[in-house]
Amino acid sequence: MYINSLEFARVHDDADPLQHFRHCFHFPQHNDRDVVYFTGNSLGLQPKSVRSMIDQTLSDWATLGVEGHFHAQHPWWQYHTLFEEPLARIVGAKPHEVVAMNALTVNLHLLMMSFYHPTPTRNKVLCEAGAFPSDQYALETHLRLRGINPDEAIIEVAPRTGEHTLRTDDICAAIREAGQELALVMFSGVQYYTGQVFDMKAIAYAAHQVGAVVGFDLAHAVGNVPLALHDWNVDFAAWCSYKYLNSGPGGIAGAYIHEKHALNRSTPRFAGWWGNEESERFQMKKGFRAAEGAKSWQMSNAPILIMAAHKAALDIFDEAGMERLRTKSEHLTGFLEFIVKDSAKERIEIITPSNAAERGAQLSMFVHGGGRAVFDSLMANGVIVDWREPNVIRAAPAPLYNSYEDVWRFGEHLRNAL
Ligand SMILES: Cc1ncc(COP(=O)(O)O)c(C=O)c1O
C-alpha cells in the first residue's frame, strides 16, 4: 500500500484535498526550507491569520476602549459564544455543553470541584498509571485539599508486564473491582507518552455501572481523534488548545459538561460574574444565577487576546473539518509507521498501537541504544520531534499542515541519524 519514495509521497500530496491548508501556517525554517514539524502534539504551528485577528482586537481596544465589550468586531462580552458551535463539532457535544475558558489544569481542578464528591465510603479516583504530571499533581493536591489521602484513594491502572499500552478489559475490570468505593474515573483520552487512544465509551459505561462519575483530559485527543462526548455519556472533560487546535502557547483551554449537569443550576461549582445569567450580568445584583449550560462555569471576563488567536485557528480547523482531517491522519500516520519500519526496524520499536482506531497522529518510538544521539541528529537537521525520558521519540504528523513529503523526509533523516 505504501512505497518509500519521494515520488509516492508527492503523488499523495497532490491528491490530498487538504493540501492547501499547509499554506495557512508559519513553518520554522532550517537552511531556508520548512522544517519537518512533527510536534503539533505539543505546540501546533501558528496560523498566519492569527496576527490579523489579534491586530483587529488591539485596534478595537485602541479605538473603542471599554466600549469594545459591546461594539468590537466580535463584542467581548459574549466572545465565548463564538466557540460553542465549532468546539461542539470537534468534541461531539451540544453547543451548550462546551465553553472556552481558563487553562487545562485549572479546568481539571474546577471540574473536580463540581464532580468529585467524596464520602467516607466512596472516595476513590481511578486513573491511568503514568498520566501527564500536571494531572497527577492536580489529583494528588486536589484530594489532599478535600481531606482525602491520595496515597489511599488513587487507583492507577498500569499496562501488563512486558506491554506498553493498556487493555480496555483491564481498565474496566479495575473499575468494577473498585465498585462502590469509586467516586471518579479520570483518564486521558489519548495517552501523552504512548499515543494510545482509550476506549472512552467503554470506560464511561463501566464507570457509570458502578455509580462513579467520569471525566477525561483531552489534551492529546482534541482535534486529533473523533470524539462523541455527549453520546458516550461522559460527565465532563477538559482540553488545551495549543496542540492540534493551533491556538498558541498557553492558549485558552476548553471544557465540556454533559447537559444533564450543565443545565442543572444546582450542580455545584465555583462561580464568578461571567458565569451569571448574561442578561443580568451588568445589573450587579446579589445572588448568583447560573447562565444556561457549560458557559456558567466561566468565572472571569474572557482573555480576548488569546481568544482571538483561538478564533483564527478554529476558523481554519472548522473549514478543514474533523472528518476529513481524521481520514488524512490515518493515512499519514500509517505512512509514517511504514517509513519508520522500513528505515529502522532493528533499532526502533513503535510502542503506539498499530491499530488505527487506537491511535491518533502520534507515534511514540523506543530507540534502542543511543536514542538521545538520534534525537539530537534529527533536531540538528531540521526535523522537529520530541524526546521523553528514558528513550522515547514522539513524532506526530498533523494532518492540517503536514505532508506525505514531510513523512518521507523524516525517514531519510532517521536513516542518516541511525
Ligand atoms: C495530558 C496533559 N494534561 C495536562 C497538561 C497541562 O496543561 P496546562 O499547562 O495547559 O494546564 C498537558 C500539557 O501538555 C497535557 O499534555
Image (cartoon, rainbow, N blue to C red):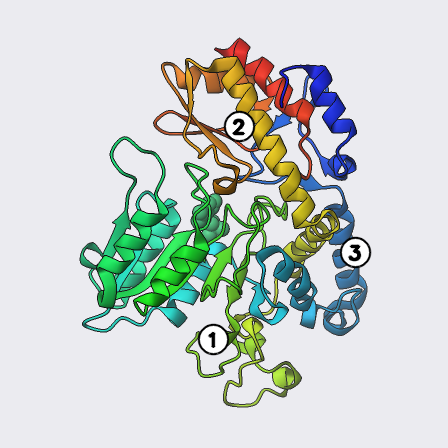
Percent coordinates x, y for residue 174 in the rendering: 26, 54
Q: Residues within 10 Å of mark 2 (few under 14, many from 20)?
A: many
Which element type, helix, strand or loop, lies under badge 2?
loop
**Residue named by callout 1:** 261
Residue located 20% across and 61% down the image? 149
Q: Where residue 385 is drawn, which disc sits there?
A: 2
Q: Is residue 291 left or right of residue 192?
A: right
Q: Label 1 sits on what residue type?
A: His
Question: Which quadrant is the N terminus positioned in?
Answer: top right
Inter-mark Cα distance, 1 to 3: 36 Å
Residue at 54 percent across and 9 percent down: it is 416
Of the two numbered discs 1 and 3 on the same chain, state the one appearing first in sequence: 3
The reply to whether the C-beta atoms of the residues labelled 2 and 1 are less than 8 Å apart is no
Q: Is residue 409 above or below residue 50?
A: above
Residue 80: x %, y % from top left: 65, 66
Q: Earlier in the sequence, mark 3 or mark 2?
A: 3
Q: Secondary structure at mark 3?
A: helix
Q: Is residue 379 visible?
A: no
Q: Is residue 87 visible?
A: yes
